[in-house]
Image: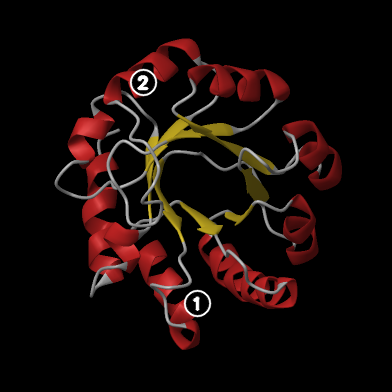
Amino acid sequence: MNYRLKGLYVITDQKLIPRDKFTNTVEKTIKGGAKLIQLREKNTPEEEIVNLGKELLSITKKYGIPLLINDSPALAKEIGADGVHLGEYDPPVSEARKLLGEGAIIGVSCYGKVERGIRAEKEGADYAAFGSPFSTPTKPHRISTPLEILKEAKKRITRIPIFAVGGINMENALSVLETGVDGIAVITSVFGSSDPEKSARELASLFVNT
């Protein structure tokens, strides 16, 4: 299936989503307008990630929304997910592509490094993610990426979509979108909310005319 990589990208958080309400909470964000879901689990046993991933996949497939797995192409393959999101210390795009196939979605974290995004594009990544434009509780020690970097990335990376991630909420999202990025990735502004569906809907509404 060819997905359009644009709009609201929601990343899960094991501390913010109760395990007994995990799939239900993610489904609410999809109902609210999330267009892409990433299962992000740090220091979780692989068996548990696989089980969670398969549960989520049953939901995302129902809505025609792609599910990506953070960090691990091998787990993405075992789960049957639509792709993987790779960080700086994860396997390269070429290795992930070989394992997951041409149809998989492969995203790459570029932090504030435009050259890393250019390289990811050349290597065959499907999107590049830049962050953090604002301070974020998820990664408190991350140096903020100026909005000017996002503008530069959009000028120099022209064949794949660009997502901004990190500390984005309704108060600052428009300033991010004004840089020309294709989408925003969020964690806390949705899953830290008392009403994830409503929060997702508010953020997704910013893309109605794009």
For the residue pair 174 and 109, the one nearer the viewer reads as 109
Q: Residue 62: x percent and y percent?
A: 55, 68
Instruction: Give the Cα distance between marks 1 and 2.
Output: 35 Å
Q: Please tell me which residue is depicted at 46% across the width and 57% down the height of the picture.
A: 11
Look at label 2 and name its amino acid.
Ile
Label 2 belongs to which residue? 149
Q: Residue 18: x percent and y percent?
A: 43, 82
> How many C-alpha atoms fall within 10 Å of the one at disc 1: few (<14), some, or many (≥20)?
some
Is residue 41 toward the left or the right of residue 123 in the image?
A: left
Is residue 26 toward the left or the right of residue 1 in the image?
A: left
Is residue 50 toward the left or the right of residue 185 in the image?
A: right
In the current view of this chain or complex, which residue is farthest to the left? 171
In the current view of this chain or complex, which residue is farthest to the top? 156
Determine the secondary structure under disc 1: helix
Q: Residue 119: x percent and y percent?
A: 64, 19
Can residue 189 be seen? yes
Indicate the quadrant containing the C terminus: top left, top right, bottom left or bottom right. top left
Q: Residue 193: x percent and y percent?
A: 25, 69
Mark number for residue 23? 1
Look at label 1 and name its amino acid.
Thr
Is residue 19 toward the left or the right of residue 168 in the image?
A: right
Determine the secondary structure under disc 2: helix
Q: Please tell me which residue is depicted at 50% across the width and 39% down the height of the picture.
A: 5
